[in-house]
Amino acid sequence: MTIAHPTIAHPTDEETRFAFGENWQAFLQTLDQERIDEAVRSLGEMLDVDSLEGCRFLDIGCGSGLFSLAAYQMGAAVVSLDYDTDSVACTDELKRRFFGDGEWTVSQGSVLDEATMSELGPFDVVYSWGVLHHTGAMNRAIELASQRVDDGGLFFIALYNDQGGPSRRWLQIKTMYHRLPKRIRPLWVMIIAGLYEMKFALARLAQFRNPLPFSDWRAKKKDRGMSAWHDWVDWIGGMPFEVAKPEDAIVPLARRGFTLQNLKTVGSGWGCNEYVFRKES
């Protein structure tokens, strides 16, 4: 199945590649035990496990390293991989803070580098949340990531939802972010985020709820332990940018021997659909 999706930049086009690692370094300053606990909880909930003891866990696009840490604390032997040097540094910092007697390797590399991926070997869990749609070659990235899943293993990915027209408008917003001087970009984030937060406030008011966003922001902290501001920066600046409808992810993987185990969608909204597949033995 061919996926119809917008894309803006090849992985080697550094001018339009968002500095994910810089954003994660800022996020690391807000990291506390509550966020770590929420990451552990959400990972276990989606994988439907209480422990990852004895499992090999591959975190592709490890970003801040938060979910590598979550898997590590659940007992997994972890391999963290990221293309971005600042993200690798963030994950290294988390490893320095929390590393004990387990196994945890942090490496720089691209999911699109077939040789690098092949050398990693098989894993019981391959995890890539909100990453593969930023490679500039999403379908190929999904394919190469899925090849690292051992027989009977789990493949947990999250991909931007294809909204049609709204997704194309978000592409324009992201493109503008990268056209602006770096010092102006936070202002652009505040403008766009402010407009949407106002829209959300009016929606809450129409439902006779408190229009202020603080309860939603607290919920964001409980949503995988993330922060509202850093999510806005990531969302508005994140490039390259591709999107997929649920069937665009599910059908090709089913043809490769993967069975859907868990699914969390955003419906017709924006954000990431989450998928957990099991590879048939």
Image (spheres, helix red, strand yellow):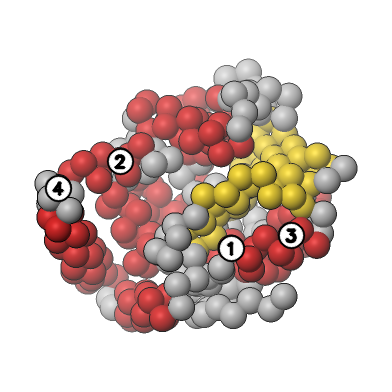
Residue 215, image quadrant = top left
Q: Is residue 159 left or right of residue 228?
A: right
Element type at marker 3? helix
* Residue 234, image x, y percentages: 38, 59
Q: Nearer the viewer, mark 1 or mark 3?
A: 1
* C-alpha distance separating marks 2 and 4: 15 Å
* C-alpha distance separating marks 4 and 3: 41 Å
* C-alpha distance separating marks 2 and 1: 25 Å
* C-alpha distance separating marks 1 and 4: 31 Å
Q: Which residue in the structure is indicated by mark 1?
A: 246
Which quadrant of the rendered structure holds the C terminus? Answer: top right
Give the amino acid type for the residue marked by disc 2 in the picture.
Ala
Q: Nearer the viewer, mark 4 or mark 3?
A: 4
Q: Which residue in the structure is indicated by mark 3?
A: 253
| Residue displayed at 77% across by 52% down | 258
* C-alpha distance separating marks 1 and 3: 11 Å
Q: Is residue 233 left or right of residue 250?
A: left
Q: Which residue in the structure is indicated by mark 2?
A: 219
Residue 101 seen by the camera: yes
* Residue 88, image x, y percentages: 53, 47
Q: Which residue in the structure is indicated by mark 4?
A: 209
